[in-house]
Image (cartoon, rainbow, N blue to C red):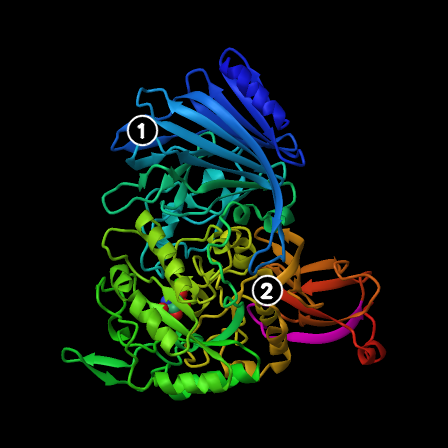
Amino acid sequence: MLLKRIVVIIGVICAAAAVNAQQTVINLGSPDGNILLNIIHRNNGSISYGVFYKNEIAVSPSALGMLLKSPVVSLTKFDMAGIDSSAVNETWKPVWGEAGSIQNNYKQLVVKLTDRSGSGIQLQIIFRVFNDGVGFRYSFPQQAKLNHFIVSDELTQFTMSGDHKTFWIPGDYDTNEFMYNTTKLSEVDASSSAMSQEIHAKTFFDKNAVQTPLMMKSGGGLYINIHEAALVNYPAMNLVVDKNGFALNAHLVPDAVGNKAYLQAPAVTPWRTIIVSDKATDILSSKLILNLNEPSKIKDVSWIKPQKMVGVWWEMHIGKSSWDYGATQSGSTIVAHGRHGATTANVKKYIDFAAKNGMDGVLVEGWNTGWEDWFGQWKEDVFDFVTPYPDFDVKELQRYAASKKVRLVMHHETSASVTNYERWMDTAYRFMKKFGYNTVKTGYVGRIIPRGEHHDGQWMIKHYERVMQKTASYKIMLDAHEPVRPTGLHRTYPNFLACEAARGNEFNAWSVGNPPEHETILAFTRLMGGPMDYTPGIFKIKLNQFDPNKKEQVHTTLCKQLALYVTMASPLQMAADLPENYEKHMDAFQFIKDVAVDWDDTKILQAEPGDYVITARKAKGKQSWFLGAMTDEKARDFSVPVDFLPAGRNYLATIYRDASTADWKDNPEAYVVEKFLVDSHTVLKLKLAPGGGAAISFTPASIIENKTIKKYN
Ligand code: NOJ
Ligand code: CA
């Protein structure tokens, strides 16, 4: 009787159930029919799922389940209590982002289960099948048999059909700032994370563990991306590779006493996401993760503005100046050393540069007391976020910035003493509003306080969300450094403009750096969850400007730094280099001045993880388009039709490209700027240097340009 009902219900939404002696299989196809989800209920009570893409296996049958403690129940065998089905096809408009409107088109099944071990606990698994992949989550409905409970393990698996090529960073409870590895699944060895000496708080737990977003490519050419969406009130998920059979097993980040999550019914887990296609470009254009997040909880969004900023920032990273004001001598006396970066006079220089060049903001780090004593101490009370150093005049800078129509961007380094930050948050945000700041960059360098908690555990996940909510209540925009990797929550809290949560450009300043392939992998991994504050735009590629012995350098050409503004979209972009370095290359800086930070449309033109990405985007509310092309360590030639331009009119293309002799290592700053007329039939030939890139702006050609600029051929 029950099984009959399932068949009938599923039939309504064009899925099918097949019943045999051992199992019931429920099938659900994507709206376009390319993806097929199987849900398998075996007679022994277990539930598993599998995913096909155009008849190829994307996910082999994979287990689902939960282990609870308090009450101690193993939720692995179930009776099927029913299935609800529905379908949605709607479009919605993000406050900002890569497209002006987004289609949300899926079919859904809610599989209602009752624990077979006798607890009577009800669990639902909600599956959504989109044209670009599958999302599912566990839901504990309100029920008599379950109120408060502790999750001790989530038993979700993602079983791969073979030994796929995998782009991975080591699993960790505290950091995501690793370099990527590209190996087969069977060759994952996360113990290499111990080599990353430049990362200060890292917690290795299993040599077979990797983080999400995890990008894989099968031998048959299927691209598979696994991540999560809407990570709220729950720990982040790592994946442990079982090398006999290629199952990826969920591993939740524990808390200080070893538990995973404290929940109260009704409760849901984040969505587990599988994005799949036979085209790499489809992975980058997927909106599945955003679609699985809740709509904006902020009603009035008029104050949320995408922005570009410069900052008293890179000069500290490359050793021109310091965050701290002085050196601590005898107890608490601080004696100025004269190298402090955040002085009133220096900040004014940046404000002048920003005003002259149309930058919206100036980030200032090292403005507040505490920097003498912040690093590596695991100390609770370091910063108070309201006490400036004596050479930083808050009032005068408020006046000066306002007179130049530039906003100062606040910095709150918490040194991971989150208890302390929680105590200061309201006071700190009131201080910001009083002095005219509307954007804050937070930071969580070091080991977390409360001691024993982790950056990616449930306690911190709740903290990050609290910061999103609280900043929103003060109409403050947010950029977080060293948080958990994002899961699309910027849809729900659009004041959460960007975050770091990966190895940023800054690693080039003081470590072995980011290899030339790094950004081509970031696009397929970290960026799947949301925009990154990568801090592009470094023009002075060799970093020995202030210390002739400094060997570090950025591992790209100058033109690739320009391309990043398009290939790594963010509503908060930094022009991260020093004003004096931009002033030597104002012809190239023009691209950073012009490039948009908010978009009506995006076309991923060509892409391959670890190799190259070429992206074109249309500026929000304007006719102009921008193109970014980036490669790894290999020089590459591309033919790029610009058929995304509207037909029937000429555009002025300003092309910023690597000079023919350019090379990230030996000749990184050699570039050429050229202007041509193009139209939608033009096919551009782009030559990227090793570690190189190209950036192009397209604006409708004026009458004069139509007469004076030559046609591209
Ligand atoms: C690490 C952040 O990623 C960086 O941007 C910041 O300058 C330092 N911490 C100091 O807070
Ligand atoms: Ca960082």
Residue 617 in sight here: yes
Residue for badge 2? 598
User: In the picture provided, is 147 more to the left or to the right than 82?
Assistant: left
The residue tagged 1 is 144
Q: CA distance from mark 2 to mark 1?
A: 48 Å
In the rendering, at what x and y percent does residue 20 appear? Answer: 54, 12
Which mark is on residue 615?
none
Neighbour tally class for label 1: few under 14, some 14-19, many 20 plus, Cα within 10 Å = few
The answer to whether residue 61 is visible is: no
- Up the image or down, 14 lies above or below 680; here it is above
Specify whether residue 284 is painted magenta.
no
How many numbered callouts? 2
- Residue at left 51%, top 12%? 1
Out of 571 and 668, give the one closest to the viewer.
571
Q: What x and y, as percent, mark residue 216?
A: 54, 42
Quadrant into which the C terminus falls? bottom right
Specify whether tag 1 is near ligand 2 (CB below 8 Å): no
Residue visible at 36% across and 34% down? 142
Q: Secondary structure at mark 2?
A: loop
**In this view of the protein, which residue sits in the foreground, 606 or 363?**
363
Toward which corner of the image does residue 30 lie, by quadrant? top right
Callout 2: few (<14), some (14-19), or many (20+) C-alpha neighbours within 10 Å?
many
Picture residue at 65% right of the left edge, 57% below the top: 602
Please identify the quarter of the rendering in which residue 279 is found: top right
Q: Position of residue 110 (x, y in %)?
A: 49, 31
**Mark toward the start of the polypeptide (2 vs 1):** 1
For discs 2 and 1, the disc positioned in front in the rendered view: 1
Q: Amino acid at mark 1?
A: Ala
The amino acid beneath tag 2 is: Asp
Using the image, determine if residue 340 lies above or below residue 72: below
Ligand 1, by image quadrant, is bottom left
Q: Which residues are magenta?
A: 663-678
